[in-house]
Amino acid sequence: MANGPDVVTCGEAMLLLLAEPGVPLDRAVHFRRSVAGAESNVAVGLARLGHGVRWLGRVGADPAGEAVLRELRADCVDVGHAIVDDHAPTGLLMRDSHPHRAIDVQYYRMGSAASRLTPEQIRPESVEGARLLHLSGITPMLSPTAAAASRRLVELARAAGAQVSFDPNVRHKLGGAAQWAQTAGTLMREADIVLAGEDELELLTAQPADEAAEELLRGAAQEVVIKHPDHSATVRTADGSWHQTPHAVPVVDPIGAGDAFAAGYLSARLRSLREHRALAEAACVAALAVQAATDTDGLPTAAARDRALAQVADGGDRVHR
């Protein structure tokens, strides 16, 4: 990354303890350790797809923080600008995994290192040379200082000539509708690329998703990707709209599909592919991600993505020999 990364992300990376498949969280005995976090998931997804990626954030000076940084490094994500906090712990996420029933997700993040992120810790050199800054609504909702740090990152990205992409990633345990609209909604309106569910657009703008998309396109947004309840997606720009249906695949673990979708879409746009192709790649990456456990196990390389797309298009051999 001599000239800077393609993408910078900033957010909360947590240690994930995933219960054994199909067992409710309160009955689980065996857990698998992994790493999770909206922005770190996207960072890993983009890195595996061949992009230079830098992750910014704070972790504790503890085994969980060491594991987070080690796992990100293993996927070639640059963590050289991450901060290790000697006085606060790395956040912990525990959840179960059921393909066809509600998933219980428990966060242990109160007072975490990630919530102590401040704008003073965001340096201009962290975004120098980047083409894209990707943020989610989770980070600014962690604390007022994390919100200020997110705003500073957007300012620095603009000064560096980078685009900004934003995924609300609404988590209701972090705050009520009014707080989400005020904090995340403000950042969403500053993004060039918005990737949001219908319900998220409605929550953050208090209007139907289509009207929200039109409002965003009249503002800073150049493209708005709307994820629908049936798992299809539509991208809208000033020049038109394109629609993508989901791939019918067996779901092992649905958590992380949105982050995988974002990585697939942003990868295509970074490669100057058109919106309809970006949607197709996003749907493919998301479909591959949900066929494996944890948020990141199923995230593909570029070669695996292309094989999957070719198989869908041509109906070729499903076995890679």
Image (cartoon, helix red, strand yellow):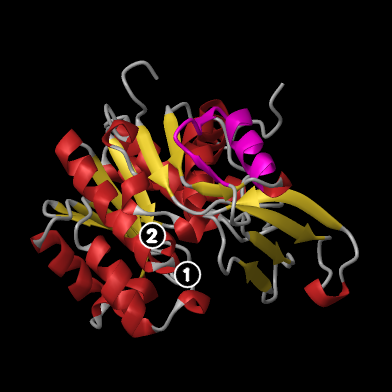
The residue at which mark 2 appears reads as: 146
Using the image, determine if residue 46 lies above or below residue 204. above
- Residue 230: horizontal and vertical position, in percent? 47, 69
Q: Which amino acid, by three-letter code, is at mark 2?
A: Ala
Circle 2 crowding by C-alpha within 10 Å: few under 14, some 14–19, many from 20: many
For label 2, the SS is helix
- Residue 74: horizontal and vertical position, in percent? 63, 29
Using the image, determine if residue 56 lies above or below residue 193. above
Residue 221 shows which numbered tag?
none
Q: Which residues are magenta?
A: 65-85
- Residue 276: horizontal and vertical position, in percent? 31, 45
The residue at which mark 1 appears reads as: 230
The residue sitting at 21% across, 66% down in the picture is: 213
The residue sitting at 45% across, 52% down in the picture is: 11
Q: Quadrant of residue 278?
A: top left
Judging depth in this view, the residue of 133 and 317 nearest the camera is 133
